[in-house]
Amino acid sequence: MALGPCCTDLQRRRVELVEGWSHHIAFLLDLLYKVGALTEEDVDSVRGGGYQSERESMRRLLDVLHGRGEEACRAFQHALQQVSLDPRPAPKDSNACGQSLIFPELQGAMRRHKEILAREHSPMDYLSIRGGAAADGSHCNFIETTLLPSVGFLVPPRYQHEATDAGDAFRRVEVPHGTQGPTCGFSTLCQSLLFGRDDGVIFVCGVAGSGKTTLVRRLVHEWVVSEETQKVIISLSFRELNLVSEPHSLQDLLCVHYSHLRPVLAHILASDPSKILLILDGLDEFRFPLDFDRTPKCSDPALAQSMGSMVVNLIKGNLLPGRSLLLTSRPHAVTKVPLQRVSLFYTVLGFSPEQQHQYFLRTCQTAEAADMIQHYVSSHRPLLRMCHIPAFCWIVATALRNLSNSQESLEQKFDNKQESVTLKTRVVGVPQGSGKPTTITEIYCCFLKAIVVFHTEGREANLGVNRLQEAPQVMQSMRSLLQDLGGLAFRGLLERRFLFDSSDLGSLALGHCELSRAFLVETLREDRASLVCERSFHFIHTSLQEFLAALYYVQQSLSGRDPFSGHKPGLLEVMRKALETARYRLLGPSYHRHIKKVFCWSESHQSGHLDLFCRFLSGLLVPSTRQILEGLFPQEPQKLLSIPACRAAGPVPPASAPPFFLKLLRSQLQRQELRAERQVNACHCLYEALDPGLPRRLERWLQLLAQQGEPTLERPQQDWSELAFLLELSPALQELSLEAQGLRAEALRRLLPVLHLFHTLRLAQNPLGPEGAAILRHAVRNPDCRIEKLWLVATSLGCEGVEILSDALKENRTVVDLRMAINNIGDKGAGHLAELLRHNHTLRDIRLRDNRVTDKGGELLMAALEDNNTLEYLWLFDNKFSKDGVRKLKEFAKSRPTLDIKVCV
């Protein structure tokens, strides 16, 4: 029997229909059944009892239609028209993002989608301390953070924790995996994602608190108010994906997450993936492994798979091919995604010093208060480095602003100066004679106190002295609640959890507590199908979770309780096994055991996610730091704060942490097997613990460096990063001599944060090479560069290294003395220096002994010196000049009485 045209057309288009229309199988079956083209038995046969995939059901449907004949096939074609795209362009006010369907639910669903995303991604105001959105919804108080685009990963060095790395973001060195480009702002990223045709993966990386999630929130806000973009945004966080332990299909996952899109989601995913912008926020928090080599390929959104496999297939483009994908992550997790899968990489650099000051101006009531905070932060390098992180700027501004207001109020009330000082010490909590907080732990203590005293239970309007006098009582009344909140933070830290539900808070009596609302951000998610509103919570910043966890641990330890008790038995077994392998044997008070226990535990975690927790713990062991939170800690016996006199290593100033703890940290630094990043973190812990031995440690370093000429001398086992940390704490040191230390480019990279701080930088007789020159380029280009004398004798720079350094020195205005003898630069290198002399009028002394420069190089230098009247010394001994070349150089020097040229055959 001859087939009709409709049957023939369906056979010809069979592959197309299975590939492109299977998502609409449910709608098609319902419609064909209603018009009588299919019987109830046909529908049941096609559905296969619900166990068939959508594609298998579509194939079965086409077979049934073929058997039913021409009329059934014609009805199917009519049904296809009901879900086909209207070819006309959508009007700008359609709110359908460029998709106009006869399918009537779509426009309403998209309007609802924009409303929900706008609410979920509204700007946080952090207790109205930090500027939020204006009345019209615009981000009027949003301060632009600086972005650095690149074609590859700009991964911080492995030895440096991201909190330490924050201050180096604006002067980061190119690493082998990427090349820097010019910086940009949010508008560039927004234009690329909302209005571009990029179908690749865009990766945004930044340290915690640098503004990644704020960028995502602002991007969603721009999408909601825009009438021009045709994109559809689907936003998910890895915190939420962590809660999905069973296999799900992408379609089912989105139906659960965005229940309002359930009727139209299949059509959105199948129609035009290039109009989908998928946002996955917080890759560093994802607990499932990503295996890009062995994960099976899956291109069917209706096929169930594990969360790890789904993310891999989304990044590879197997799922939703042609979509745009925005990933965000902290630095340590960026290498989870292969470099070739990322089309563009942005590093969030955070705030520049100018942006920091702008932020302080907006958060302080007066310009004088903002200037005071900026000046204070600038005078303390650890704080200055951290203030490149916007979230830390907010914490510092909150702590210092309320502290300043408190002191002014007290001084106005009391005429007696001594009485005012005494009361400030007791109420504000700042140790007498110590001034404002200088450690990170002290800043967070002041921040916590400011929130509890001034920003909970309607206290915002009462900033007077009465509030300050009641501070110890207020802190004491909040002790149990803060302990519960800290317990939640500590449990999350143990389990690598950052998202909590109502049951977590309810079990700790935090569900309706004003204090929990001060430190936790609540997210509501509606499920219109089941009429359920799901609530989840996370701390306003991950560093605050780490601080509260450390606070809880110290509270429990001082009370004689085990902070690890009360958690999951299975987790405790894991902890015990890890601690048994740590090879420690403890004697003495339980307080000592608890502190040693957590540090041994943190050493077993190589990811570094416990580093900041350990720093806070170190700072909270200082009695004067705990005094800031007077009323919160029990009155611990003095014997818990020290070890017996017979075991004491010597007198320790009362301002520092207990002697047993300082001894523990110092012993860590002596261990040769300790990794570099652990050494750096131990130094940070000693700084937070106010260790009086840090200056002596730097002194020993300098003594070792001064004895570089003795080959039998035992080389220092400590990492160069430790030296960089110690040098940052010594602003009075003007000269750094690292001559003949076997210093290579990687070691120099570790010292980069401090290289620009010295007037004299001696690096002679080290195999730096061109890679070392690339690092020095960033030091001399630093806006705060102080280098006047740069000595690079016998550093294997070669022609390539001289070119890199000469290019950097063209804009430098501090280096006056450049010594580059024995670097084999040749005439080509002399040409690069000649080009430098045409642009730089700061250099006074250049010494190029034994560099294989010939007459040609001499002529290039003389030509450049015709336009340079500032160079005073040019030494060219032991090069390859002919007698005629020497004569010309000497004659040129005679014509320039202010220029001394030293040259010989």
Image (cartoon, rainbow, N blue to C red):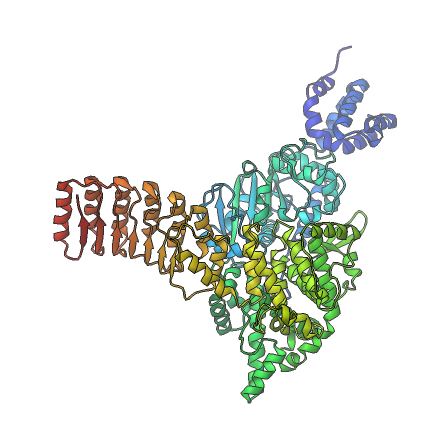
Residue 722 showing in the rendered view: yes
At 49% from the left and 70% from the top, the residue drawn is 376
Q: Position of residue 689 (x, y in %)?
A: 58, 66
Instruction: Give the camera-side residue of 619 and 639.
Output: 639
Up-down: is 303 above or below 701?
above
Residue 258 showing in the rendered view: no
At 59% from the left and 66% from the top, the residue drawn is 441
541 left or right of 75 in image: left
Q: Quadrant of residue 470?
A: bottom right
Q: Position of residue 876 (x, y in %)?
A: 22, 47
Instruction: Give the camera-side residue of 209 and 792.
Output: 792
Q: Position of residue 293 (x, y in %)?
A: 63, 33
Q: Quadrant of residue 852?
A: top left
Could you tell me which quadrant the N terminus lies in?
top right
Q: Position of residue 587 (x, y in %)?
A: 70, 62
Instruction: Give the camera-side residue of 187 and 799.
Output: 799
Could you tell me which quadrant the C terminus lies in?
top left
At 65% from the left and 50% from the top, the residue drawn is 604
611 left or right of 370 in image: right
Q: What is the number of callouts on the image?
A: 0
Furthest residue in direction top, as rendered: 1
